[in-house]
Image (spheres, helix red, strand yellow):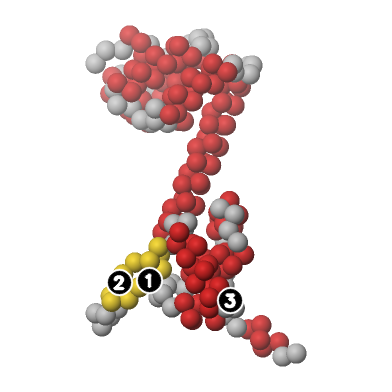
Amino acid sequence: MNIDIFKCKKYITNSLFIKQALKLKLTLEEFLMLTYFDNDYNNYLNIEELSKNIGLPLDKSYEVFNSLLSKKIIDVKTDKDIEGRLIERVSLDNFYALIMSDEKEMQKSEIKTDIYAEFETEFGRPITSMEYEIINGWLTHNYSEELIAGALKEAVYNGVKNLRYIDKILYEWNKKGFTTMKDVSNHLEKRETKKEESELFDYNWLDDEE
């Protein structure tokens, strides 16, 4: 056997691509076609050429292509070539958007796990289901993990380990437009420029007035 046959064009993909394909329960033929389009950066719509390159019969290629279209995993967009002629391109934007969406959700999940663990460490006990929902509510209302952790440290420093106190701190910080702990530090520096940064948590935010 001539090993040169293995030197033909290779199609590569990454783990995120594969994970999303598995999640969508794509067939092997759908996965092969999607991988082909992912590697074909021109993505001109040519089913005959596609069929030849991935080794599927022409009728099967049309069937698989239409399946990916119906599932809205791919899309066909009209474009112009350099000579101004109309051409059709295959877009994987929908598929890439699904990958990005899942990755963002995973990152949010990791952030939540970290912040819950931080509360349990500072409180010295597991948080209750009600406390879990309150913390989750802060995250849902777009309080950053950094700001929540800062409010937690503020409360612990003042010897108050309850979420009502932390919620009031977050409310005051939000009212002042703080989104990071740097914003908090800058506010204190403007109010009392002679204080050291270590005094960040020695401040009564609930009585703070502009």
How crowded pointer 2 is (Cα within 10 Å; few <14, some 14-19, many 20+) is rated as few
**In the rendered view, does 42 fall on the left or right side of 120?**
left
Going 39% across and 20% down the picture, which residue do you hit?
170
Which quadrant would residue 78 be assigned to in this image? bottom left
How crowded pointer 3 is (Cα within 10 Å; few <14, some 14-19, many 20+) is rated as some
Q: Secondary structure at mark 2?
A: strand
Going 33% across and 9% down the picture, which residue do you hit?
207
Residue 147 horizontal/vertical position (percent): 42, 27
Against 71, residue 163 (above or below) is above
Going 48% across and 11% down the picture, which residue do you hit?
158
Which badge, 3 or 1, is on the more N-terminal residue?
3
What mark, if any, has residue 160 been given in the picture? Answer: none
Residue marked by disc 1: 89
Task: Please state which of residues 41 and 157 is positioned toward the viewer in this rendering.
Answer: 41
- Type of the residue with mark 1: Arg
User: Marks 2/1: CA distance?
Assistant: 7 Å
Task: Please state which of residues 41 and 126 is positioned toward the viewer in this rendering.
Answer: 41
Q: In the rendered image, which quarter contains the C terminus? A: top left
- Type of the residue with mark 2: Asp
Residue marked by disc 3: 56
Which badge, 2 or 1, is on the more N-terminal residue?
2
Residue marked by disc 2: 79
Against 122, residue 207 (above or below) is above
**In the rendered view, does 51 fall on the left or right side of 140?**
right
User: Marks 3/2: CA distance?
Assistant: 27 Å
- Type of the residue with mark 3: Leu
Front of the two marks 3 and 2? 3
Q: Are marks 2 and 1 in contact (CB under 8 Å)?
A: yes
